[in-house]
Image (cartoon, rainbow, N blue to C red):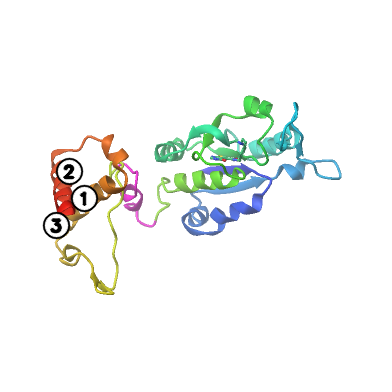
Amino acid sequence: MKCGVVSLFPQTLSVIRDYGITSRAIKKGLLSLHTWDPRDFTTDSYATVDDRPFGGGPGMVMMAAPLRLALNEAKKAIPNAKVIYVSPAGKRFDDACARSLAKAQQPLIFIAGRYEGIDQRVIEQDVDEEISVGDYVLSGGELAVMVIIDALTRWLPGALGHEQSAPNDAFSEENAGLLDCPHYTRPASLDGVDVPKVLLSGDHQAIAIWRKKQTLGQTWLKRPDILEKLTLDEMSQKLLAEFQQEYKTI
Ligand code: 9D3
């Protein structure tokens, strides 16, 4: 998956370039990450990239010209890319979106905005898709771009150490959009709190059933909205009813 990012703060992308699963995906050649800074495409002595909004009002707007010069360099280096502008006004990003971007295999060029945003004419003429990461206000697009690249990298075949990992995470398909079950590691007893016995039993079927039940129960406790949208099979209904019964009697 080829990714380019047009940003006034290209160094901030080091968070995904230098750490964790995204960094390893780059080293494995599954992901590429290159940046272009509109400031490098200015010609005035102040290296101006922003200007006051027509019509007045607070804040500044990213100028079209340096942004487009940077974007055109990115497009030359990454042919056939889809241009994504991350913005609070975009379509809400979720795991289905991450998956479909990963699956499509089309190279991506992200525009990360700063100030009040970018000149509208760049959105109209150069942008294919506008994406938001949630209903809160960020100080710029870089964190949103990193959220999107991180989430889609997890769906690239071979990006995770063991390919079972992604499908078992929250909101994935195999778990049918349910939350994850609780996890434990050594020691078996911590300040008098023991790991659930079944996990030490070696009975793989019993463990799988316990995990399924926890998955349903945790979702019922923490995200009932997710559960309301699902139709559970008979086994799941039975396990959830058991969890609810046990929860109420504690
Ligand atoms: C006062 C109007 N603001 C819009 C809600 C202006 C504004 C705030 C923050 C314009 C741009 C930004 C910077 N945000 C992003 O670049 C951004 C973002 C976000 O703030 N929330 C959720 N998703 C995203 S994706 C990019």
Q: Residue at x 56, y 43 (%)?
A: 3
Q: Under tag 1, what secondary structure?
A: helix
Can you give x and y, in whole percent of width and height, for residue 37 in the image?
70, 45
Whether residue 230 sits left or right of residue 54 in the image: it is left
Q: Nearer the viewer, mark 3 or mark 2?
A: 2
**Magenta-drawn stretch contains 170:** yes
The label number, if any, that marks residue 152 in the structure image: none
Q: What is the quadrant of the C terminus in the image?
A: bottom left
Residue under label 3: 206
Query: Do the residues bearing badges 2 and 1 touch, measured as CB atoms within 8 Å?
Result: yes
Which of the marked residues, 2 or 1, is nearer the chain's N terminus? 1
Residue under label 1: 212
Is label 1's Cβ within 8 Å of ligand 1? no
Whether residue 96 sits left or right of residue 218 in the image: it is right
Q: Under tag 3, what secondary structure?
A: helix
Determine whether 202 is above or below 88 in the image: below
Residue under label 2: 236
Q: CA distance from mark 3 to mark 2?
A: 15 Å
Amino acid beneath label 2: Ser
